[in-house]
Image: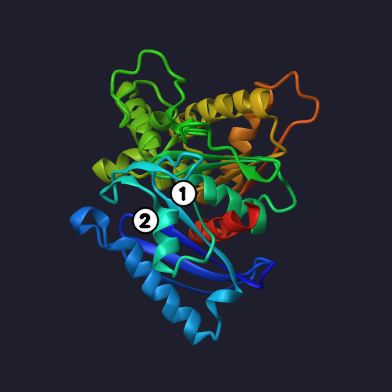
Amino acid sequence: MKQYCAGVDVGGTSVKCGIFTTEGVLLEKWEVPTRKEEDGKYILPDVADALKQHLREKGIALSELEGIGIGVPGPVEPNGYVHICVNLGWHDHWPAKEMQELMGGEIHCAVGNDANVAALGEMWQGGGKGHENLLMVTLGTGVGGGLIVDGHILAGVHGAGAEIGHIHVREGEPEACNCGGHGCLEQVASATGIVREARRNLLASSEDSAMRSFGDALSARDVCDCAKAGDALARKTLETSMHYLGLVMATVSMVADPEVFVIGGGVSKAGSFLIDLVKKQYEALTPLLTKKADIVLATLGNDAGIYGSAKLVLAQ
């Protein structure tokens, strides 16, 4: 195996890039703007130009690079085909093939869904280090998932593996999810969902709550802070949200039996308080399991994508 590899995490605003040793040491990282005009045709050429420049500056020849991994915000089929990335303007795209051509045609390139590669990164050098079977749960504006089985991403035949945010968990939900469904996990356990749940609780109750002071500016962080401070209505909100997350995690355990769940994303900044809530729900819903999965916090933050993308080329 060669000494170096590179990871690329393509986002809607910027593309994060990193050069690593094949042992997982991050040598350098940087970002380039995501130019989405003309159906995103400039995105990968910009990345390739920047990568060549940074490799030259570090004195690393292309021949010393094991490969380049790319994480993209959309489903990726096993052959590397990306039907659509709405946030990038891509349609019918082959990112790994394009990157390989841009880098001269010889370097091995691989592509994966961004949530999946983030899970791979946390397995390699983050909260899941030392485990080869895990589910990463990302609680942000939405709810993302990445399932790793025996050290490899389980993406599914159509690239929709571990899309846990769109598992149906709640009957009678009147509002539609971004996917078009009703009652998805994302609608109750994401940052947006937690705020929605809190507002509903505030409207349905005359109970005193510190959450009322935030008005329309109420955020998921505010809900978590209020719950930590002993606010009963805020705690009720989080217990509901974490109940549904625990339900999905229990279901995943019965299907894939992971060693560990790694919780990341903005909502996870509530720390051990949040972990304790979801752990209580998960354990109550898995009576069959005498050996239950650990539940831990992600540690790589926004770098999980570049770590996982780099690991992607080493895992293939």
Q: Position of residue 50 (x, y in %)?
A: 39, 75
| Separation of residues labelled 2 and 1 (CA atoms) | 9 Å
Q: Residues within 10 Å of mark 1 (few under 14, many from 20)?
A: many
Relative image position of residue 108 (x, y in whole percent): 54, 61
**Vertical order, 42 against 251 (above or below):** below
Residue bearing the label numbered 1: 114
Q: How many marks?
A: 2
Q: Looking at the image, can residue 208 be seen?
A: no
Horizontally, is 89 left or right of 223 in the view? left
Residue at x 41% of width, y 30% of height: 188
Mark linked to residue 11: 2
Identify the mark nearer the N-term, 2 or 1: 2
Contact between labelled residues 1 and 2, with CB atoms less than 8 Å apart? yes
What amino acid is at disc 1?
A: Asp
The image position of residue 128, as x and y in percent, is: 67, 49
| Image x and y of residue 263, in percent | 57, 44
Task: Using the rendered view, name the quadrant where residue 165 is placed.
Answer: top left
Q: Residue at x 42, y 41 (%)?
A: 223
90 relative position to 262: left or right: left
